[in-house]
Every structure is written in structure tokens, then in C-alpha cells.
Image (cartoon, grey):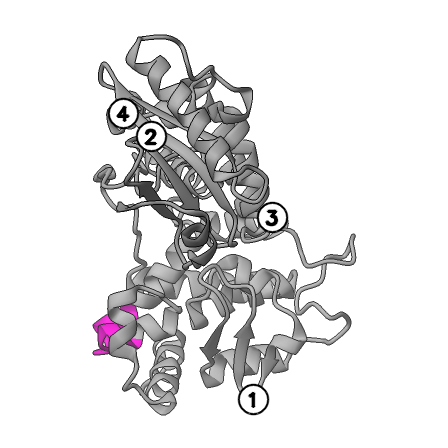
Amino acid sequence: MASIRLTDARIKALEPTQNTRDVRDANLRGFGLRVLPSGRKRYFIHTQFKGQRIWKLIGDADQTSLADARESARAVLAAVRKGLPAVASSDETRFETVAEEAFRSQSRHWKPSTLKVNRWYLNNQILPWFRGRQIADITRKDVQDWFMSLHATPVAADRSAPVLSVIMTQAEIFGHRPAGTNPCRGIRRNRRKGRERFLSEAELRRLGEVLSLHATERQWPTDIITLLLLTGCRASEIRTLQWRDFRDGHLHLRDSKTGPRIVWLSTSSRDVLDGLPKTSRWVFPSPRTRGPVSKTAVESHWFRMRSDAGLNDVRLHDLRHTYASLAVMTGETVPVVGRLLGHKDSETTLKYAHLSETAVRDAADMMGIFLEGKDS
């Protein structure tokens, strides 16, 4: 943390950066100025007493003079040295209050479904442990103890930890914690056995036969499952597909889990889409609402299909795993499969740069041929 002699002129000259910046005063130990990315500047004290961190904001630079801020800081620091309760607990800096502030700030960056899931983890896994605590007092050990308390539900622990980390990062931005003190940093997630399930060639043939039988009863569920097999897309991506997303032989997914992406379609998958009626802006419209067919409806039909095919342990997402495994087994490289699936891993993304659109499209066509059981 930088240390300079704070003056009115130097405070005015401090420019905001992309990250929150704390500057300590060289004249008064424990006193400093926080410069937020927004340009807002706030005075703070940061010291310790008997091993406990003391952190408190004491005014905005545009509303409080440097002289007044220093005087307030001296009074607080003197009280700390005497062991007096100089920094009273504030409702504004309690964990639950800051968490709500963080959620309001982040809500515009999260999808509604993500916000709903994160809210569940906050209410059920995080708040019961941290409610009532001053957010600046929460240490890495506190977070480790909380994480270990969820050992019976490792999935919940792994998914709650990033939510807590977001709250702590936002707390730094808001000025409720010192910069660079996120106690979630470095927490190691639980190791879990993968749940991936891959269909064998025999199972794919059985499923193909069942799809043909179900198509005579109702076509759209069969078409959705077929597209999942032929594209490797997520079920939500196909279920909410709009006709404007299908052009130039590609799917242009604007709201994919990993952000906007293009799906290269095989001849077989294009044939499925070309054969569907265009009665709505949705490729698979709900017969009851103006939106897409519901997740419940798709899963209901899938449960029947997988039962008829003797595949009761196969989830819809396993069709995506199967698509990837077939791509690898037929000789496709990891970078090509990554492009096919729309993965956004930072390391493998660098390897995608040299791949041409033709290479990825050829791989998609090959997958369609393989899944249909034709000779290549």
C-alpha cells in the first residue's frame, strides 16, 4: 500500500484506476485515503488492536476537509490505543447489509436464473454463518471454518464460495474492507467424482429407435433431443432458440451460459431445423404461453424416452457429454471439441485462435454422420 504525505493538492491530483487504490498518510500512521474506480475518494483508518483489525471510513474527501479527517482519525486511533470502543458497530457494515448492497450492484451483470440461484446460496448457506458480523472483521480463517462446515454438502460449498467472494470483493469496492483483503482468495474447492455419463454406440442406436417411435406421436420433443445430440448444445440453448438465431447455417446464441457464441451446424442438424414450422419467433414455442416450451415439458418427454430406451440414469446434459466424447473418439482435437461446445476456458481459448471456421464446420458435419449411424 502506497504511503505519501497527504495534502489537499495531492488528494486532488490522485487519479482513479481500474482497481480500488488505498494511499496511506505518511504523517499519521493508520490514516489514509481510498480512491475508488468511480473517482470517489474516502478517508479511512486502518490499524490493529490486540490482533483485531480496525477498519473504518471517516468521510468523503469532497465533503470532509483533510484537516477535519485527520482530527477524527487521531481521536479514533487514540481511543484504540487506550482500548476504548472507538469504532462502534454499524448496521451499514454488517455482513447482511453489505451482501444486499453487493447483490444490487451485481444484479445487472447476472442472468435472472443466476441471480435466483445465487440468492438461494446466500440465504441458505452463507447468511446463517455470517449474519450479524462486521464485514471488515471476517478473516480467512472464518471463511475456511465456514467452508469446512459444509463438508457434508460439497457441491453447495463449492457453489457458495464464489458468491461469498463476490460479496467480499464488492465490500472492498464500497470501502467496507481494506483493498486486497478478500478472505475467500485461495480457498480450494472440494474434489468430486465426475458425474459424466456417455452413451455407447449400442445405447445411441436404442435411443435412435425410440426417437423414431416417439416422432409418430409428437414431433417437437424428438426434434429437441435430436438437436441436442447433433449439436452438443445445452438443453436451455435449444429450448429457448429463436428463428433469428438460425442463419447462414449457424446458430448465433446471444445468451449462452458462457456468453454469445456461434454453433456450427452439421447437415443433419440443419435438415431438422429446416423441417420445422415457423409459427412463432420461438423454434419450439409453448402451446400454452407466448414463450418457449418449458423446461418441465422437455424433461417430461425426455424421461419417457430414456425409460423406453432403458437409459434411466441418463440426464439431458449427458447428451452433451456424449457428443464431446464421440468427437474425441473420432479423432477431433481438444481445441476443435472446445469450439464445438463453446467452452471459454482461458488457456484453451488461446489454442483456438489458429483454427479456421472450415475445420470446425467439418467436425460438426462428421458428428452428424456418426450419430446417424451412416458410413462416412
Q: Position of residue 84 (x, y in %)?
A: 37, 8
Q: Gap between marks 2 and 1, in whole Å?
A: 59 Å
Q: Gap between marks 3 and 4, in whole Å?
A: 28 Å
| Mark toward the start of the polypeptide (1 vs 4) | 4
Q: Gap between marks 1 and 3, in whole Å?
A: 30 Å
User: Image check: 109 left or right of 334?
Assistant: right
Q: Residues within 10 Å of mark 4 (few under 14, many from 20)?
A: few
Stretch in magenta: 326-336
Query: What kind of element bears circle 2?
Result: strand
Q: Which label was assigned to residue 46?
A: 2
User: Image check: 217 left or right of 5?
Assistant: right
Q: Position of residue 353 (x, y in %)?
A: 30, 82
Q: Which label was assigned to residue 151?
A: 4
Question: Is residue 37 in view?
Answer: yes
| Mark toward the start of the polypeptide (4 vs 2) | 2
Q: Foreground mark, 1 or 4?
A: 4
Disc 3 + disc 2, Cβ < 8 Å? no
Residue situated in front as seen by the camera: 92 or 349: 92
Q: Which residue is mark 3?
A: 112
Residue situated in front as seen by the camera: 198 or 13: 13
| Mark toward the start of the polypeptide (1 vs 3) | 3
Q: Foreground mark, 2 or 1?
A: 2
Q: Position of residue 231 (x, y in %)?
A: 44, 72
Q: Which residue is mark 1?
A: 248
Task: Name the amino acid type tagged 2.
Answer: His
Disc 2 + disc 1, Cβ < 8 Å? no
- Residue positioned 66% across, 69% down in the render: 283
Q: Residues within 10 Å of mark 3 (few under 14, many from 20)?
A: few
